[in-house]
Amino acid sequence: MQVRIFRGADSSAALAQVKAELGIEAVILETREVMDNGRKMCEITAALERNVGMTRAKPSEAYGDMSSVSALTGGPGAAAPEWHREWSEIKSCLMSLMGKQLDKDKLSPRQRQALDYLEREGVDPKIGVTLYKCLVLDKQTSLLAALAEILSVRPLTLASWPEKIHCVAGPSGVGKTTTVIRMALAAQQEKPDLRICLVNADDRQARGRLVLRHYCELSGFSYREAGSREDILKLLDEADNFDRIYVDLPGMSGPQVLSERLTLLGLSEVDECAFHLVLSPHYGKPQLDHFLRAFSFARLSSVIWTKLDEAASFGGLINVADSCRVPISAVSWAAGFKDCMAPAENMLLWKLIFKHELPCGQAPEKLHA
Ligand SMILES: Nc1nc2c(ncn2[C@@H]2O[C@H](COP(=O)(O)OP(=O)(O)OP(=O)(O)O)[C@@H](O)[C@H]2O)c(=O)[nH]1
Ligand SMILES: [Mg+2]
């Protein structure tokens, strides 16, 4: 519901404003007389209730009054897709026009070739403009150095990630449960006596629960289920018994966003907790943009890229890194649990993006040939 206050010299002037701004569906909540600079004015509090799912905020509304757009669309998360989509399309068009105006003769032939290649890989034109500016302003800098400013890495190793609790979130079917098991196995391989607990916070998927439980039995991990705030509190009570806790969060559906889900579970304020978002480059740009809105969260720690073997281009890694400004921690490229996930490193990413070479040394299309 959008609530606004209007003032006019008299009631009809104030009512005219209500009609103009909120339309005839507005409900008058209160009318009162107020003094404004010694003058009597009529003040009307009016509200407009709209079905969030049906509302399409006009760009003019969006730019004129950010708070009312937020109220109309339910906030900056997944519930505001139209406004975000329109704005991102406008930005993209402007940047693409700017991109066409760039004087690429100011670049060396190799730099020009690399920028053109990134464009073909689906890298957002706005990032192309940023890279161009870096290269033109500092002749000494290389394209990879400029790209590394955007595409940061924090390799998924015990030393780089000392946090005890690791929550794994992402869209349905992206590979969250598989990633949780891979993370636990990699940690165990690094330090065999580590006390590891796998937590199933997904009370809707029986399959995920079975797989997690099975791997716990096979590998000597502890197993817990935690679908509610009370369960999470119980888990935190016994956290001293474990060195690492990996939490498999449920896939998101409907209008709920990750921050709401974590708050409901009581996980959003837990210290010593890292939050990893699992994505795959085989999603198109609008889909990745949508996921970034649904999973945007102030404490997001890293992105883990899965299913590299199923992707045909990797520009999405750069676009996502630019949008959410968190490092990549790991990448995976096959359906198994072992030997198909690697901690992220710059060189590995350059080979992936520029040569389409997976960390196993193969090209994605050859892996499935
Ligand atoms: N090709 C390929 N398949 C993968 C990869 N990672 C996971 N998978 C497969 O993707 C499918 C879904 O994996 P899950 O781990 O169950 O995905 P999830 O996100 O937990 O799924 P939900 O719990 O249903 O939301 C499984 O068949 C995995 O084997 C990968 O890197 N490459
Ligand atoms: Mg799962």
Image (tube, rainbow, N blue to C red):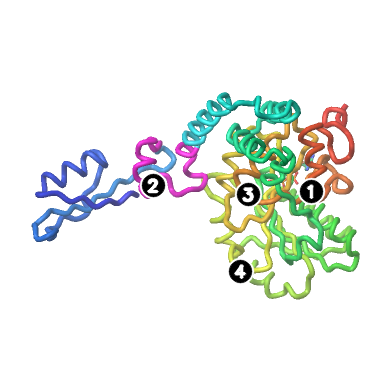
Mark number displayed over residue 230:
4
Q: Quadrant of ligand 1?
A: top right
Residue at horizontal 74%, vertical 26%?
Answer: 109
- Residue stretch in magenta: 56-84
Return the disc, 3 or 1, that comes first in the chain's sequence.
3
Return the disc, 4 or 3, that comes first in the chain's sequence.
4
What secondary structure is found at the residue carrying circle 2?
helix
As displayed, is residue 181 above or below residue 94? Answer: below
The mark tally for this picture is 4
What secondary structure is found at the residue carrying circle 4?
helix
Q: Nearer the viewer, residue 134 or 149?
A: 134
Residue type at mark 3? Answer: Arg
Mark number displayed over residue 344:
1
Q: CA distance from mark 2 to mark 1?
A: 38 Å
Q: Is 132 in the magenta? A: no
Return the disc, 2 or 1, that comes first in the chain's sequence.
2
Q: Nearer the viewer, mark 2 or mark 4?
A: 2
Q: CA distance from mark 3 to mark 2?
A: 23 Å
- The prevailing secondary structure element of the residues shown in magenta is helix
Name the residue beneath numbered marker 3.
325
As displayed, is residue 230 above or below residue 250? Answer: below
Residue at horizontal 35%, vertical 47%?
Answer: 68
Name the residue beneath numbered marker 2.
66
Task: Count neighbours of disc 2 (C-alpha within 10 A) and say few if under 14, some if 14 to 19, many if 20 or more.
Answer: few
Which x, y percent locates residue 128?
63, 33
What secondary structure is found at the residue carrying circle 1?
loop
Q: Nearer the viewer, mark 4 or mark 3?
A: 3
Q: Nearer the viewer, mark 3 or mark 2?
A: 3
Q: CA distance from mark 4 to mark 3?
A: 32 Å
